[in-house]
Amino acid sequence: MTNKNPQKSTKTPNIDPFSLLSETQWRYVTARVENPSFSKKDAAEYIGIEPNTVYKWDTYVDDALEVARADIHRAALDRRKQAVLKAIAVKIALLDSEDENVRSKVASEIIEWELGKASQGVTVGNADGKPFKTESTNVNIQADNAHDAGNILAELARLGAIPSGTGKNGHDTEVD
């Protein structure tokens, strides 16, 4: 006897079952993963479709469900990738908007995604607009013991050369 409705399995390493799912099929798989006790009929009714619909779907939906149950993180990542593609398609469609402001904003967003945001200069200086004066001093200090090292750190902190407070190994750098 010949099967009138042969189902092709997509259980091959070359085909990702998630890439084949429609929005409704994604909702169905999600409902079955979230509610493991759901039958096909229960899940169909839960998402608001006729139960007979799910029985007509190709086996890649069952394959996707099996993979999703085994690796929920992969399923979520694949779903997110599809959402990004959909979001990009929306942005691209807005390039044809009748509103010039919308077209311009979307064009800028797409360009910035691809090329990065245009560099913007930032001026930092004193209240009078002049640049800050900075000095860098390297100090090589040798102490014979921890007490001397603590005193040296405390003096540097007092002079503002280093922040005051607790230094390395819990030594206090403030002068008593």
Image: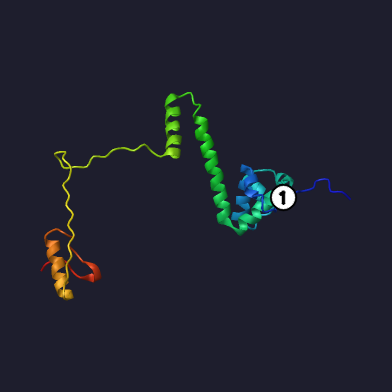
Q: Position of residue 8 (x, y in %)?
A: 75, 49
Q: Is residue 42 left or right of residue 116?
A: right
Closer to the camera in the image, 159 or 100: 159
Q: Is residue 46 visible in this depiction of the protein? A: no
Picture colour scheme: rainbow
Q: Position of residue 112 (x, y in %)?
A: 42, 37
Image quadrant where residue 105 sits: top left
- Element at badge 1? loop
Pointer 1 residue: 59
Name of the residue lying farthest toward the right: 1
Q: Quadrant of the C terminus?
A: bottom left
Q: Is residue 63 left or right of residue 159?
A: right
Image quadrant where residue 100 sits: top left
Q: Position of residue 2 (x, y in %)?
A: 87, 48
Residue shown at 55% from the left, 55% from the top: 73
Q: Is residue 121 visible in this depiction of the protein? A: yes
Residue shown at 13% from the left, 39% from the top: 128
